[in-house]
Every structure is written in structure tokens, then in C-alpha cells.
Image: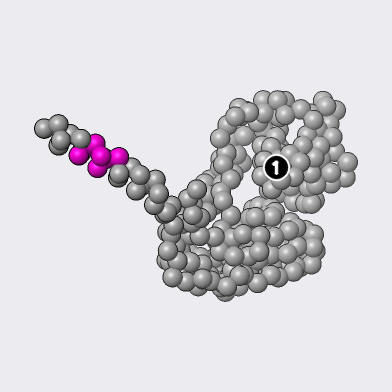
């Protein structure tokens, strides 16, 4: 009996040693996709237009874009502002045509992702499929959150939420969370927040008088984060995750990394 216990102990110990010495698991990729090409878009130029056949997704490398809808009567509704790391064109997947226009607010560069390559990447890589599904889910959740803000929040809440969101996004990119440029016009900002131009100007002036922010042209400095959190009605530690990018800085699709 004693010999059996000793043998079992040695076997367990050897199993642990084998597990410790075995190589870390790594996802096997039978296919290596080429790096995505780049495209430059000058300020005021369109990256894609509503009704145009959907063939590509775009990831902003640098610069700023605005997306918007235009009615048959020429009325414009701004639907978002895209900065580095953001994906443009997801709305074209369902119908095969882009649903919104995207125009550069400054000289911008994007990575061009042919959608067939994205589909192949998600089929060949479990990690890629995970990232693509989470990206689509985040797009849906973000649209729902924005609709909720337009329907239930006061004007000052919407403004505070917008400033805090841009602060979070810039901080994630490694830039200052308290000082950044807003490339959009006050009119575009009002369209996105469901506010008039006059209301946007009044709110920014009021926040500046109160010492919460400082505005100089397109430059905005956030001086009092607790005041903005209170105004927005959110806690300072409220979880609001930003997803991993689907490509790296060189335009290569990301796959699961070797575990450390």
C-alpha cells in the first residue's frame, strides 16, 4: 500500500514537472494575411458615402472623421466622430452598402481592410472571430447608449458625457486625457448631441465660467473631472472598456499571442 501511495505521489510530481516544462499554448494559424494598405483622405474629402457598395472596412490610423446621415430633404444628422483606432464602415455589412457618409475633418490616414480578408481572418482565427464579434457588439451598444442619451439626458449631461468620452478615448491612445483638440465645428457637435448651435456655445461658456473646462478655439482643457462626473451622473470608476484593436500599428491582423 505504501509503495502504491509513493508511486502515485511520484507520478503526480512528474506530471506537474511535465506541465511546467511544456511549451505555452499557441494558436496555430495556417494562413498569414498580408498587411492592410493605407489610404490618405484630405480634409473635407469623403472616405465613403451612403449608398456606395460595401467592400471595405477602414481603421483610422491618424486624423479625425465625422459620420453622418443626410435625409432626402438635405437635413444632416451627425452620427459619430472617429479618431485613431476606430473602425469605419461597419454599417455596410448588413445591406452590402454603406449607410452613412464619412468625411475627414482634418488630413487623415486609414488602413483599408478588404472585407473578404476580414471574413477569412475571423474563420481562421478564434481570436480574430472573438475580436470581430466584440467590435460589432460594441458598435450596437454604443448606438443604443447614444440614443438613450438623446432621449433621456439633459443638455448639460450630454455635453459632460461627450467630453469625458473623448477624454477616455484620447487617454487610451496614450495622449493627455485633460487637454485635446475637438476638430468638429460647434454645429456638428450640436447635431451629434441633439442640441442647437446656441445651446452648445452657451454650455461651453458656462462650463468655462465655472472653472470646469477651458476652451480656446478647438482646444479644450478639462480642469475639474469630479465636476464633470457629477454633471454627467457617472462615477469616476464607472467601467467603460475600450476594445482591443483588430490590427496592429503596421496594419497586420492580430492573432492570439503566445501565453507568457
Q: Is residue 175 above or below residue 105?
A: above
Q: Mark 1 — residue?
A: 171
Quarter holding residue 164: top right
Q: Residue at x 79, y 63 (%)?
A: 107
Is 182 on the left or on the right of 94, as rendered? right
Q: Residue at x 69, y 64 (%)?
A: 110
Quarter holding residue 194: top right
Residue 117, position in %: x, y? 52, 71
Instruction: Identify the coloring.
Output: one colour
Q: Is residue 96 above or below residue 183?
A: below
Q: Residue furthest right?
A: 216
Q: Nearer the viewer, residue 29 or 17?
A: 17
Mark 1 closeness class: few <14, some 14–19, many ≥20 residues within 10 Å: some
Q: Residue furthest front?
A: 3
Q: Is residue 131 visible?
A: no
Circle count: 1
Q: Nearer the viewer, residue 153 or 213?
A: 213
Residue 155, position in %: x, y? 69, 35
Residue 9 included in the magenta stretch of the image: yes
Q: Residue at x 53, y 71 (%)?
A: 33
Q: Nearer the viewer, residue 25 or 179?
A: 25
Where is the N terminus found, in terms of image quarters? Answer: top left
Residue 128, position in %: x, y? 48, 59
Q: Is residue 28 above or below residue 185?
A: below
Q: Residue furthest left?
A: 1
Residue 168 included in the magenta stretch of the image: no
| Magenta highlight range | 7-13
Q: SS class of the residue under badge 1?
A: helix
Q: Is residue 138 visible?
A: yes
Per the picture, the main secondary structure of the magenta-coloured stretch is helix
Residue 39, position in %: x, y? 71, 70
Q: Residue at x 57, y 73 (%)?
A: 34
Amino acid at each position: 500500500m505504501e509503495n502504491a501511495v509513493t508511486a502515485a505521489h511520484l507520478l503526480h510530481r512528474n506530471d506537474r514537472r511535465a506541465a511546467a516544462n511544456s511549451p505555452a499554448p499557441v494558436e496555430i494559424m495556417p494562413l498569414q494575411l498580408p498587411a492592410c494598405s493605407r489610404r490618405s483622405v484630405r480634409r473635407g474629402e469623403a472616405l465613403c458615402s451612403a449608398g456606395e457598395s460595401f467592400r471595405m472596412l477602414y481603421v483610422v490610423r491618424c486624423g479625425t472623421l465625422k459620420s453622418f446621415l443626410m435625409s432626402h430633404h438635405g437635413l444632416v444628422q451627425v452620427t459619430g466622430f472617429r479618431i485613431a483606432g476606430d473602425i469605419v464602415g461597419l454599417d455596410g455589412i448588413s445591406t452590402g452598402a454603406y449607410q452613412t457618409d464619412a468625411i475627414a475633418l482634418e488630413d487623415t490616414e486609414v488602413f483599408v481592410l478588404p472585407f473578404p480578408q476580414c471574413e477569412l481572418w475571423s474563420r481562421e482565427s478564434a481570436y480574430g472571430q472573438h475580436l470581430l464579434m466584440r467590435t460589432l457588439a460594441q458598435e450596437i451598444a454604443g448606438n443604443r447608449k447614444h440614443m438613450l442619451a438623446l432621449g433621456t439626458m439633459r443638455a448639460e449631461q450630454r455635453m459632460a458625457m461627450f467630453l469625458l468620452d473623448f477624454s477616455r478615448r484620447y487617454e487610451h491612445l496614450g495622449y493627455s486625457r485633460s487637454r485635446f483638440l475637438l476638430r468638429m465645428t460647434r454645429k456638428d457637435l450640436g447635431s451629434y448631441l441633439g442640441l442647437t448651435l446656441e445651446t452648445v456655445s452657451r454650455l461651453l461658456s458656462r462650463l468655462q465660467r465655472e472653472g470646469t473646462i477651458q476652451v480656446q478655439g478647438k482646444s479644450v482643457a478639462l480642469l475639474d473631472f469630479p465636476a464633470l462626473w457629477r454633471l454627467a451622473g457617472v462615477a469616476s470608476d464607472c467601467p467603460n472598456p475600450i476594445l482591443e484593436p483588430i490590427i496592429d500599428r503596421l496594419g497586420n491582423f492580430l492573432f492570439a499571442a503566445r501565453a507568457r
